[in-house]
Image (cartoon, rainbow, N blue to C red):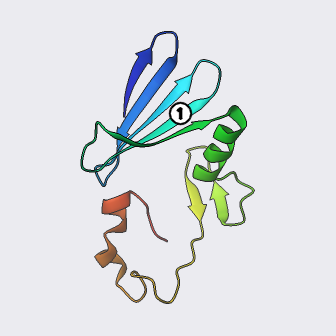
Amino acid sequence: MSTTPLPGIGVQYDLTTREHRHLSVIAHRDGTRTVNVYRADDPDACAQSLHLTGPETASLIDALMPAHHSPNVLHTTDLGLVAERIELSAHSHWNGRVLGETRMRTETGVSVV
């Protein structure tokens, strides 16, 4: 992730996902946020831009980083580790596969217990 100061506006945070998609978030000085998603075929062309209020931003953060009260979160630690139960459907791509074949930790950084 890279950070770019935007004088008089705020700060822009840019990141490229594992799927090579370009995303940016502009943290405006007034507390609002703009989330930009760029086109896959042209990472400089913005495909979608969402302007979020402060409360909308807080809701999005809560959805991305569920609080300890979430029924699926089993345990959190001071180290920032979270144990979360995720149910897979019977038709899941992962159902019936050997855990090592999933390359889950290599691909995502997630440990499966």
| Residue 49, image x, y percentages | 48, 40
Front-lying residue, 49 or 10: 49
The amino acid marked with disc number 1 is: Thr
SS state under label 1: strand
**Where's the N terminus, which quadrant?**
top left
Which residue is outermost to the left?
Answer: 41
Identify which residue is drawn at 59% across, 64% down: 84
Q: Is residue 7 above or below residue 38?
A: above
Q: Is residue 81 above or below residue 100?
A: above
Which residue is outermost to the right?
Answer: 69
Mark 1 lies on residue: 34
Tell me the quarter of the picture where residue 3 sits. Answer: top left
Identify which residue is drawn at 71% across, 60% down: 70
Q: Is residue 103 above or below residue 47?
A: below
Front-lying residue, 59 or 101: 59
Identify which residue is drawn at 46% across, 69% down: 112
Left or right of 63, for residue 89: left
| Residue 19, image x, y percentages | 30, 55
Q: Is residue 81 above or below residue 32?
A: below
Front-lying residue, 43 or 76: 43
| Residue 57, image x, y percentages | 64, 38
Tell me the quarter of the picture where residue 79 sits. Answer: top right
Identify which residue is drawn at 49% across, 28% down: 26
Front-lying residue, 25 or 40: 40
Which residue is outermost to the top?
Answer: 8
Left or right of 50, for residue 23: left
Left or right of 23, for residue 62: right
Left or right of 30, for residue 27: left
Neighbourhood count class around disc 1 (C-alpha, 10 Å): few under 14, some 14–19, many 20 upward: some
